[in-house]
Amino acid sequence: MQLLKINQPFAEQDIADFIPHRAPMILLDKVIGYRRDNLETEVTITAKSPYFDDKYQAVPNYVGIEYMAQSIAALAGVEAKLRNDKIRVGFLLGSRKLTLYAKQYELGRTYRTQVSRLYQEESGLAVFDCQIYLLPEAGTELEKSLVAQANVNVFQPQDTQAYLAGNQDAANRSLGH
């Protein structure tokens, strides 16, 4: 297992080192910063961004929930690397208070996602406060602007395969198989 490069800035490390996703489903560009229970990531929208819509020259706003979820996954990944543990799969259970202030993520613009752990149980169930900000264009004196926010509920089992097998067995029993 590759160790976290503590002396190397997060932005210089491959985001794939922190999340269980693989291309083409890696939506984020980089981890910007970490502190206990908090993480910031960035994505710059290009014509090659997953879910990019040529007609609107943008990524639809509903993809923001996945930017939040992948940022949460990256936080779990950073923490796993710090413990010298493996990166594990997690599940997005849902969100509360999801508010989308922008219609889309615009071509050429950079967005920063901030996630903060509000609560976590030993079972792996957790709740995060998440925000996505549109960063100002270089050379302007504008402030970053909030484009999306939500409380996101996630679950990360200790053993994903056993968890999935257990759920499949329970589903089959409920169907009478």
Image (tube, grey):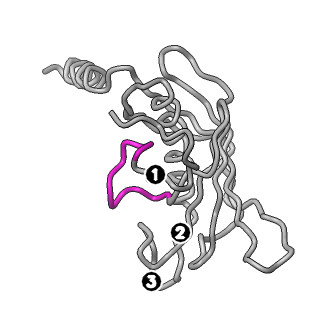
Could you tell me which quadrant the C terminus lies in? Answer: top left
Disc number at residue 33? none
Residue density around tag 3, few if under 14, some if 14–19, many if 20 or more, within 10 Å: few
Name the residue tied to disc 2: 60
The earlier-in-sequence mark between 1 and 3 is 1
x then y, percent, for residue 51: 43, 68
Does 165 appear above or below 43?
above
Secondary element at tag 3 = loop
Q: Badge 3 is on which residue?
A: 54
Query: Could you tell me how far apart the alpha carbons at marks 1 and 2 are, in whole angstroms?
Result: 22 Å
Question: Disc 1 on helix, strand or loop?
Answer: helix
Tell me if mark 1 has few (under 14), some (14-19) or many (20+) residues whose alpha carbon lies within 10 angstroms of its own.
many
Residue ID at (36%, 29%):
86
Say which label, 1 or 2, has the lower sequence index: 1
Residue type for callout 1 = Ile
Q: Is 28 on the left-hand or right-hand side of 110?
A: left
37 left or right of 23?
A: right
Q: Which residue is mark 1?
A: 15
Residue 88, x across and y down, in percent? 38, 31
How far apart are the two marked residues, 2 and 3, measured between alpha carbons? Answer: 11 Å
The segment highlighted magenta reads 17-28
Q: Residue type at mark 2?
A: Pro
Cα separation between marks 1 and 3: 25 Å
Residue sitting at 42 percent across and 25 percent down?
84
